[in-house]
């Protein structure tokens, strides 16, 4: 058979090529370029090699932010994943008004813009007019997220749980819905306990969506910016300053563009590395439980 | 076990999924539930298993009323159309799971699992996970899990339907041997008449939620009580032609006239319906007694090593069987031959009046 040769096929990938170039490759390369320069102003740049990277790696405040970030992300996963699974297990199945209502209620937090979520919680937690803050005050708990670091930290965490557990629950729900009813019948005939049904049928069947949920929640929480920025502005002190916020302070606040660029690249590599580690661990555990 | 159903029925909302029926299954018997999709086979099985409670009637196991007893406390195992295994357990663990729940000791579990696995030829795969097996092997694993439980009642709900043709034939042949020596009462649901014939035992024919007939498979096949039952138990469906019976001939609606045979002689004259299975309407004239029937080819369908010719004949469509693979141009004239010794005569209302003679035990040759 004659092979049809038509080089015009290349034109078809130009749009994608351009979009990826402008949205990802060129900005990334610009950052790489900045990260090896000392920049005083337009046209006043000096090549400094790896100096910025060395400075970033030695930065104490960055180390603190990184540790804070890791603890925060792990806490997010430790709460949201089990809670999401529990909610999904408790959700009504089938096509009923109850199911639709539950789905809408669950989807609501996901539809709210991030900065609005921050604002909601900022007001919610206020001691004078906020429902949460006022309630705490009324029952005698001295709750104040603006000057108590622990309170601020927990508030940011609870806000994230409120905002994102729905996503995990919806993903798990989709996974559960894909289990044919015959599996449950078979388990019933076998006399399997509720725990056995969860451990040997539901959990393995949810494995695929759980991988996605863990990765999404990890990456997202590791890059969290808007909500704590609106709620606490990173304070009190630096107690809720996570990596992205520290990066913004460096780049926009102090206009330390070279160092911020180096930081960005390190940040990017950290997210990549952690995601890779997570992915590898999750796909290895329970290998073959795909089906 | 002896499973007795006394007037059980199932109604869901305003819909009657299963009309009241009574049935008694003997210990160690092999029972086929035959019916098309939506005939109520699965509904009936669920009632037998105890997955659902009947809306009327009673279910008895060995004479003991278990109507309200949950499936957890019944002595039953089930195999499904889909391949249901625990996805995270190896084949060995899957098969062992019912035994572990029964609290059997390790050596006994090991011996039983290996014996059952050998019977179903999955010994080489004991360490694999179900997802790493082919469909046929997955179903073998599910059957092994059901068998090893040693339940008094084993239900198989179209277990071979999701397998490809070759695997289905292979496993079907083995199933006969596996169940042959059992003390277990086996119920096997299928849509295929052929499968019921090959598996033998007893058959219960269901249609639109009603039980049409029950009895030994050969008997039901050769003397279907009604036209409906004959239709369900014939593949392709039985040819039906309106006819008039006189004292020496039966005249089909198109004018073809068949001589009477031993079985349909001395019947009261009058209108009737004549049924002919496709394999008794042949393209080849096998002997001089066969009567030609003319028609136009509507379709010729090749199935394995035989051809089914659909022909327009008056207002109805007849299906004739032909050995070997042949092609007939659509619309061409064709002559097929009806065997007057093998026709069924039904009353105008569809009740069986006369069936061709048959020898008990000759089932397989005729089917």
Image (cartoon, grey):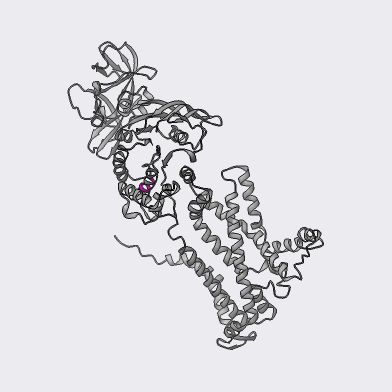
Q: Nearer the viewer, residue B89 or B343?
A: B89
| Residue B334 visible somewhere in the drawing | no
Please name the residue shown 60% across and 66% down the image.
A220
Picture coordinates of residue A246, whole percent (x, y): 66, 76
User: In the figure, B116 relative to A264: above or below?
Assistant: above
Q: Nearer the viewer, residue B352 or B316?
A: B352
| Membership of A31 in magenta stretch | no
Picture coordinates of residue B211, whole percent (x, y): 42, 26
Q: Nearer the viewer, residue A116 or B354?
A: B354
Please name the residue shown 58% across and 59% down the image.
A81
Quarter of the picture holding the C terminus of chain A: bottom left
Q: Is residue B200 left or right of residue A224?
A: left
Picture coordinates of residue B70, whole percent (x, y): 51, 38
User: In the figure, A6 relative to B309: above or below?
Assistant: below
Q: Is residue A22 left or right of residue B154?
A: right
| Residue B235 visible somewhere in the drawing | yes
Picture coordinates of residue A226, whole percent (x, y): 67, 67
Q: Which residues are magenta?
A: B138-142
Q: Looking at the magenta stretch, what is its main secondary structure? A: helix
Q: Is residue B223 left or right of residue A173?
A: left
């Amino acid at each position: 058979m004659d092979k049809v040769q038509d080089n015009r096929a290349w034109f078809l990938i130009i749009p994608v090529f351009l979009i990826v170039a402008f949205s990802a490759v060129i900005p990334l390369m610009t950052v790489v370029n900045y990260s090896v320069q000392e920049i005083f102003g337009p046209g006043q740049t000096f090549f400094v090699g790896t100096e910025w990277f060395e400075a970033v790696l030695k930065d104490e405040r960055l180390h603190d932010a990184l540790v804070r970030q890791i603890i925060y992300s792990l806490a997010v996963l430790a709460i949201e994943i089990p809670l999401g699974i529990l909610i999904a297990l408790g959700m009504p199945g089938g096509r009923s008004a109850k199911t639709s209502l539950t789905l809408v209620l669950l989807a609501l937090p996901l539809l709210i813009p991030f900065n609005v979520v921050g604002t909601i919680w900022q007001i919610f937690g206020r001691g004078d007019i906020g429902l949460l803050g006022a309630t705490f005050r009324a029952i005698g708990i001295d709750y104040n997220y603006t000057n108590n670091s622990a309170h601020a930290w927990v508030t940011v965490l609870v806000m994230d749980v409120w905002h994102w557990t729905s996503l995990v629950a919806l993903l798990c729900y989709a996974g559960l819905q894909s289990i044919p009813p015959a599996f449950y019948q078979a388990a019933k005939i076998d006399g399997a306990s509720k725990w056995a049904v969860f451990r040997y049928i539901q959990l393995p069947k949810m494995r695929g969506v759980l991988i996605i949920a863990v990765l999404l929640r990890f990456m997202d929480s590791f890059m969290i910016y808007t909500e704590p920025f609106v709620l606490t502005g990173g304070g009190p002190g630096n107690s809720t300053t996570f990596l992205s916020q520290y990066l913004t302070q460096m780049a926009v606040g102090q206009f330390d563009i070279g160092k911020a660029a180096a930081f960005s690249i390190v940040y990017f590599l950290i997210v990549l590395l952690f995601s890779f580690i997570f992915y590898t661990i999750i796909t290895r555990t329970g290998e073959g439980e795909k089906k | 076990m002896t499973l007795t159903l006394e007037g059980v029925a199932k109604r869901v909302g305003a819909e009657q999924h299963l009309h009241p029926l009574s049935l008694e299954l003997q210990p160690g018997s092999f029972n086929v539930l035959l019916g098309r999709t939506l005939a109520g086979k699965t509904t009936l099985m669920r009632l037998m298993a105890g997955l659902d409670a009947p809306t009327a009637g009673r279910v008895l196991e060995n004479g003991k009323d278990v109507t309200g007893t949950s499936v957890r406390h019944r002595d039953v195992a089930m195999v499904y159309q889909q391949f249901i295994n625990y996805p995270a357990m190896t084949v060995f663990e899957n098969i062992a799971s019912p035994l572990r729940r029964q609290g059997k000791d390790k050596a006994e579990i090991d011996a039983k699992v290996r014996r059952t696995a050998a019977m179903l030829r999955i010994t080489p795969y004991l360490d694999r996970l179900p997802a790493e097996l082919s469909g046929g092997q997955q179903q073998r694993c599910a059957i092994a899990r059901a068998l090893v439980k040693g339940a008094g009642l084993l239900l198989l709900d179209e277990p071979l339907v999701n397998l490809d043709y070759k695997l289905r034939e292979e496993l079907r042949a083995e199933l006969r041997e596996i169940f042959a020596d059992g003390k277990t009462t086996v119920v096997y649901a299928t849509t295929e008449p052929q499968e019921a014939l090959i598996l033998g035992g007893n058959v219960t024919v269901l249609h639109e939620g009603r039980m049409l007939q029950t009895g030994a498979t050969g008997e039901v096949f050769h003397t279907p009580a009604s036209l409906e039952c004959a239709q369900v138990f014939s593949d392709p469906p039985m040819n039906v032609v309106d006819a008039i019976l006189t004292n020496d001939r039966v005249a089909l609606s198109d004018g073809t006239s068949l001589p009477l045979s031993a079985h349909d002689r001395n019947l009261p004259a009058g209108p009737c319906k004549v049924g002919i299975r496709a394999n008794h309407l042949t393209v080849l004239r096998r002997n001089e007694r066969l009567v030609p029937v003319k028609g136009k080819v509507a379709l010729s369908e090749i199935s394995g090593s035989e051809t089914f010719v659909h022909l327009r004949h008056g207002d109805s469509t007849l299906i004739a069987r032909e050995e070997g693979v042949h092609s007939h141009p659509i619309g061409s004239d064709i002559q097929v031959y009806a065997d007057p010794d093998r026709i069924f005569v039904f009353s105008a209302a569809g009740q069986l009046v006369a069936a061709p003679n048959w020898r008990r035990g000759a089932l397989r040759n005729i089917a």
